[in-house]
Image (cartoon, grey):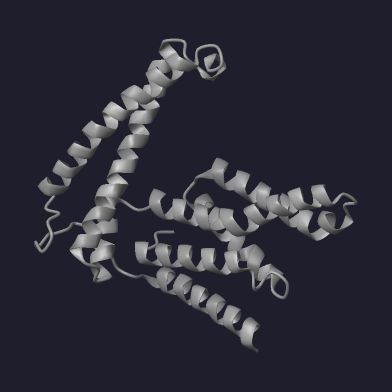
Amino acid sequence: MNLDFRSKIAMTVVISYILLLGNLHHRYFPVVVFLSALPYLLLLLERKYVEALKGLVLLGIAILMQLFLLHRLSSSVLEAIFLFMSMVVLRMAPGVMMGRYSLLTTSMSDLVASLQRMKLSDSLIIPISVMFRFFYTVKEDYHQVKDAMYLHGLTGKTFFSQPVRMIEYRYVPLLMCLTRTADDVAVSAMTRGLIVGGQRSSLSQTKLHIQDYLCLSLMLAVLALDIWSRYA
C-alpha cells in the first residue's frame, strides 16, 4: 500500500500519542490492540516478513501477559518486570516501528517533496534531508567497518580479551568516515539544488490518494475517541 509521507508521519504521531498516554487502554483495549498491530501489518504489506512477524509475536505475548498473567503473580518484583516489558511492547514499540516503516518506505525525493507540500521552510527541510542522508550513509559505513574487523578476526567474542584493539579498529575508522561523510552529504545537498530560498524542481509527484484519506480519517476517529473517553 503506497502511502504518502504526510499520512505516514500523521499516523506515527497519532499512534505514539495515543499509546503513550494510555487513555484508551482500559475502556477500549481492542482499539489499542489494533493501533499496536497496525505498523506490523503495514510492514507485512511491504514484505518485511521477519520484522513484522517478530513484532506481532511479541505483541501477542505482551497482550496475553497483561490479560492473564500480571494480576496472578505472587511476587511484586516479577509483576513489575513483566508490567514494564508489556508496557514497552504495547506503548513504545508501535510508535517506533511506525516511524521505521515511514523511513523505510519513503525515498528522499518523496520526503523532500512532501515537506514542501506541507509548506515548511527551506531552513527546516534542508537540515532534515541532509540528516537522513547522513544517518543512512553512516549505517553503511558502520557495516563496512564491522566486515573489515571480521576479516581481522575481531568479533564480539574477542572484546574482553582485546578491548583496546576492538575500540581502535571500530571507532577510529568510524570517526574518520563520519568526518568524510558529513562533507560529502553537504556537497551532495548543494549539487541537488537544496538551497534556502531557491526554486527546486522534483520528479516526485506527491499526492494524497484514497488510502491516505482513509488512514487520516482513521487517525482522526481515534483522536476523537480519545477526547470523548476523557471528557464524556
The residue depicted at 10 percent of the width and 64 percent of the height is 197
Q: Position of residue 121 (x, y in %)?
A: 21, 67
In this picture, residue 220 sits left or right of residue 25: left
Residue 151 sits above or below residue 86 on the image: above
Q: Nearer the viewer, residue 55 or 133?
A: 133
Q: Position of residue 107 (x, y in %)?
A: 31, 51
What is the residue that sits farthest to the bottom in this orientation?
Answer: 232
Q: Is residue 42 visible?
A: no
Q: Position of residue 122 (x, y in %)?
A: 19, 62
Number of numbered discs present?
0
Q: Nearer the viewer, residue 164 or 228?
A: 164
Q: Dividing the image into 4 quarters, which one contains the C terminus?
A: bottom right
The residue depicted at 45 percent of the width and 51 percent of the height is 100
Q: Position of residue 223 (x, y in %)?
A: 54, 77
Q: Dividing the image into 4 quarters, which one contains the N terminus?
A: bottom left
Q: Is residue 47 visible?
A: yes
Residue 183 sits above or below residue 98 on the image: above
Residue 142 sits above or below residue 113 on the image: above
Figure quadrant of residue 117? bottom left
In this picture, residue 191 sits left or right of residue 117: left
Q: Nearer the viewer, residue 21 or 45?
A: 21
Figure quadrant of residue 70? bottom right
